[in-house]
Image: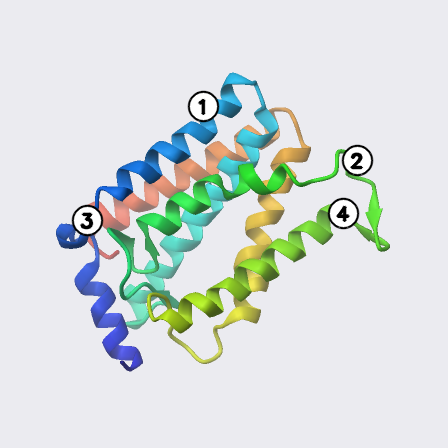
Amino acid sequence: MNRPEMTDQALTLLRNGDNFHWSAIALLAFALYVYVKEYEQRNWNYIAAGLALYSVHWFFEIGNALVQHFTGHALWTVPGGTSFLLLIGVGWELSVMFSVAGVILSKLLPEDRRRKIAGIPNRWLFILFNAVFFSVFEIFLAWTGVFHWVYPWWGPVSVCIFVYIPFFAAAFWAYDNPGQNRWRFIGTMAGLDALMLILFASILGWI
């Protein structure tokens, strides 16, 4: 399947309920359980990390969908393998995974944010490690055919630098900075995401 065909395939799946599977409900329950458990224990740092990453994730996905609208091809697409394609580059399963990724991975952070590992500040080491891991995993997804990088210059290196490093930097910053600033950031990002979805998806129908 060549690149234009993969884009066409993704567009046929976009918010199409034909492939919906009940497992989507189980995934939603899993994500809700993660957040309810952290709320029950008043683990605000983990909740903030999760919401910060998820709000940034949606900002990037909306941006990718806008690239699709204006150029004819998104940077990445999901041409198959999902029960429900939310936007051109993200299916329900990926989105649920990103909704809890910040919560889960922030649990691996050392308590002392100033501690260095192999001479590297541990927060930056964990940001880079997670960014590389997720980028490498995208290679596997692309190999399966359920995920596709459209342009030859957009691949694991560019994804690592321009997508996953911002994801985990936002998550770990929110984790490390208790107070109103992190909630303002999350609220601003979530509000911007909602506004763009209403405007570009519901009103204009661009994405």
Secondary structure, mark 1, is helix
Q: Which residue is mark 4?
A: 122
Secondary structure, mark 4, is helix
Q: Which residue is mark 3?
A: 20
Task: Check whether the beta carbons of the residues at disc 1 and disc 2 lie within 8 A of each other.
Answer: no
Say whether residue 3 is left or right of residue 8.
right
Q: Which mark is residue 2?
A: none
Crowdedness near tag 2: few (<14), some (14–19) or many (≥20) residues, C-alpha within 10 Å: few
Task: Pick out the residue farthest to the left.
Answer: 18
Asked if residue 74 is positioned above or below residue 91 in the image, the reply reads below
Asked if residue 13 is positioned above or below residue 41 in the image, the reply reads below
Q: Which mark is residue 36?
A: 1
Three-letter code, disc 4 = Asn
The Cα atoms of the two marked residues, 1 and 4, are separated by 28 Å
Counting residues from the start of the chain, the first of labels 1 and 4 encountered is 1
Q: Which residue is mark 2?
A: 112
Secondary structure, mark 2, is loop
Three-letter code, disc 3 = Phe
Task: Check whether the beta carbons of the residues at disc 4 and disc 2 lie within 8 A of each other.
Answer: yes
Whole-percent x, y for residue 144 in the image: 37, 70
Tell me which residue sits at (28%, 60%) in the image: 81
Counting residues from the start of the chain, the first of labels 1 and 2 encountered is 1
Whole-percent x, y for residue 202 in the image: 20, 45
